[in-house]
Image (spheres, grey):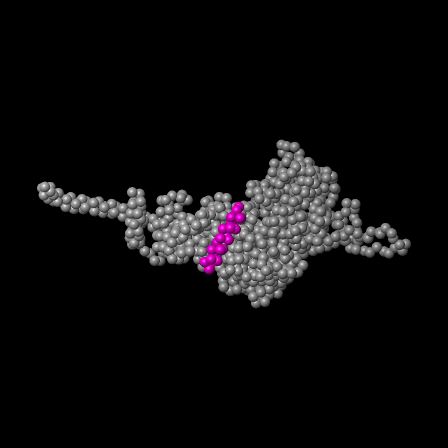
Amino acid sequence: MVDIKFIIIIITLCCCLPFAACTSVPKPEQKAPVPVEERSVPVEEKHKVETTTTPPPSPATEPTPVVEVTEPITESELEVKQTSGPAVVALLDDVDQYEKAGKSDQAAATLERALRIEPRNPKLWQRLSYIRLQQGQWQQAIAMAQKSNALAAGDKQLQLTNEKIILQARKMLNR
Amino acid sequence: MPGRSSPKRKKRQPKRDSSSARTKTLQWLQIVTVLFVCAASYVIWLDARVKSEFEGRRWALPARVYAQPLELFAGLALSRQALIQTLQGLGYQQVKQIKGTGEYQVLSDAIRLSTRAFKFWDGEEASRRIQVTFSENAIANIMNVSNAEPLAIIRLDPSLIGKIYPEHNEDRVLLAYEDVPPLLIDALIAVEDRNFYKHFGVDPKGILRATWTNLRTGELKQGGSTLTQQLVKNFFLSHERTFWRKFNELIMAILLERRYSKAEILSAYINEIYMGQHGAQAIHGFGTAAEYYFARPINELRIEQLALLVGLVRGASYYNPRRHPERAIERRNLAIRLMLEQGYLSEQPAEKALVAKLGVTEKPGWSSAKYPAFLDLVRRQLHRDYSSEDLRSEGLRIFTTLDPAYQEIADNNMAKQLQRLETAKQLPENVVEGAGVITNINTGEVLALIGGRNKQDIGFNRALDAKRPVGSLIKPAVYLTALTQAAKYNVLTPIEDKPVNIRQKGGEPWVPKNYDNKIHGTVPLYIALAKSYNLATVQLGMQLGIAPVKKTLRQLGIETAIPDYPSLFLGALELTPMQVTQMYQVIASGGFQIPLKTIRAVLDKQGNPIQRYPLDIKQTLDTNTAFLMQFLLSEVVNQGTAKAVRAKLPHLMPLAGKTGTTNDLRDSWFAGFGDNILAVVWLGRDDNQPAGLTGASGALAVWTEIMRELKPEPLSLLPPQDVQWLEAIAYDEKGDNCANMKQFPYRLPYLPTQTTHCKKAQPKEKPAKEKPAKEKPTIKNPWSILNL
């Protein structure tokens, strides 16, 4: 008896298979996704990890900080490459490219890489200070310019540029 | 006569036949319909389960924690051996000829390697074939082998130092179908399911063949399960071996094949199949298994290694290569032979593979226990910004500041020196504990963290949690306070080291003593700190007042409650080694408070940037004052309580630091730095009993040996804008000695105005004709308070 039942079930199920296919609602778009991507189940809001690409807000919380350059800081003033080794020069090329592309966070990160190699280079600190100034991070701009000054004993030109940066940052802070 | 009954019978029979036949048919139809409906619903239900499991599946992936990547550039002080060690730590294989990524070749004075591509926060580092040439323990140059051009700088992929696991201990190294090595797919098909591309989920031919082989050989060598069936088993069903489970498996395998393509099924299989166990954690998927068994990405595995992994699907525990290497090799070689038989491998590579070693790493390819103290710090900092849920399930990639080479040096020397000290000072074994923090001065990055003498101990993280009295480590705060009053104090200001008796409200008077119980009289300020005279420090502190010293401590980044008692001047303040490091960071950096940083950036599981932790500095001390303090601390090492450093590491001088010892030798501290690295070491007993070690005899010894290997840059005593060096008579206990001149830093505009001439000391064996003594201008009574 068991054998007959078994056979019946198998046969019946085999007959059911085409029906099974019909009963499911075909959704051609909904393929089984490649495992590395998110599944069709939406991520709950509280599990979502925020993506931030904008720099953290400055203390003055200005939406688009406009740095009024009363005393312009020229590119030649910020020129670092003459004083650096080839590794840092290569990184500075990347910094230039990032800045041109408007990616100031990446530019700053690359400058930090350079600083790990030449931490006593006052021009690197100055360059970072200038990026912070442009990003509206006034406190950091001031601190980095001060750090640059601390390392720049005897270099009047460098100190002058640092003072310009500090002046502008202070002006923005006092608004 | 037959005539009478037969018509009746004849009449009735057809009637009975027809009705019973109809009834039977009806009954039959009823049964069939019911069965049909039941079966159909069952199948529909199974189908829905298949769909929801397959598509609704969302792996909770652990966060992966990386050390800082090694950056290679010409001029980097890195020996060839050190680079080899780093490469081995990253799972790079030494080869005679480089064919793929993750391989290196050792030449006489150079290393050729093919780096792995890696996506960093600030961009992607491409895979490159380079040659690194060494000269005198430093990199001389780097060449891009592909175009024979010099390469200025290149970043290696960072070392994985740990993971932060979801509660159910899942982990996956997910592989996209395109990233699966074709040979792996070939191997799976050859070994597990020859007809994979042809069957519909179940392979009757395969079952027959397997049964035949098993009967023939008398062993259960082959199973008839298809890859699809195995996937179903892994995905949905428990491990019972019942008829019903097998039955469901068949149905679901067929349903799976109807819904999804072969590629999709294969892809899911490769990422889902059970491959082993690591304690409470299950290893699923070939990507994860490659990391677990070989510490390499799957695309770098060789033929025999892929074959081993494929062999494991049949029984990961039974064929565990670490526990049962002989079984593993046999199984692996069976797999290789099957691949050869079916034409997926040619003779030569197959033969080479058959005789190759297993190649599995001794320990699992990652080890969250590798640097538990540092990982603990990382977790704490992450918890400020991320929920536990996100950390454990989103597959975040966390890039830290750890330097694994530094960490190893720190851990090894702590253990070694403690053992040596125990023997030398006859201390009980394994009782004195230690902690340490090593940071980059200019960036505030934590390079290494010592939580205890046993680096594997995940218990008490002393670097972060052991609050101990700091003793003499506090003295720089007192002297800094003095130096900020530049008009009143300079490095040569005389301080009186004389007895102190301070009445305290409703208590015994406080009568501190010097460590050597002596009274040293009037000494210049720099000597009082260099020799760590308690009485002189308290005298100075009383002149300044407690409030200004507290203010200085706040400028040094101390945020905890500070007691209002004069005993503060001698360090009656409890701090953790981490807090002490934060404090000395300000002095070492020249007056800039830089919050100690452990994480550089966080990326999501696809490698897209989420958050960066940028360099963040704040000036809290005047640069010139900070410089004077650096000078004072260099004198501690030059001739003060830490002069053993000068004797042991003369080639690294000048270095600066401060020793600290508390009452009854319960705590032994040393905080010291060069130009780029700061290290703080603490030794003591967890039960707070006397440890029998002073700062100089204990913590300093550990610090010295660590720095001997780390080789910090010497302190650059280049004065800032408003500091000038002037020569004066150095302190001598016996009295003024003009032969003993020294450079001292002075804060502008507070320069000494009075000078005096110094007669040069008469040499012992002097000829009869005496030449007039050479006159050298000097400062009269150098340690008197200056007139402006």
Q: Does the stretch in magenta take in B483? A: no
How many marks on residues? 0
Residue at 79 percent across and 48 percent down: it is B736
The image shows residue B111 at horizontal and vertical percentages of 61, 60
Give whichever of A86, B233 is nearer the camera: B233
The image shows residue B199 at horizontal and vertical percentages of 37, 55
The image shows residue A56 at horizontal and vertical percentages of 49, 54
Residue at 34 percent across and 48 percent down: it is B46
- Image quadrant in which the N terminus of chain B is located: top left
The image shows residue B291 at horizontal and vertical percentages of 51, 52
Residue at 52 percent across and 64 percent down: it is A97
Q: Which span is picked out in magenta?
A: B323-344
Residue at 36 percent across and 44 percent down: it is B244
Question: Can see residue B125?
Answer: no
Q: Quadrant of residue B20?
A: top left
Question: Can see residue B507?
Answer: yes
Main structural element of the magenta stretch: helix, strand or loop? helix
Residue, far right: B768
Give whichever of B100, B775 is nearer the camera: B100
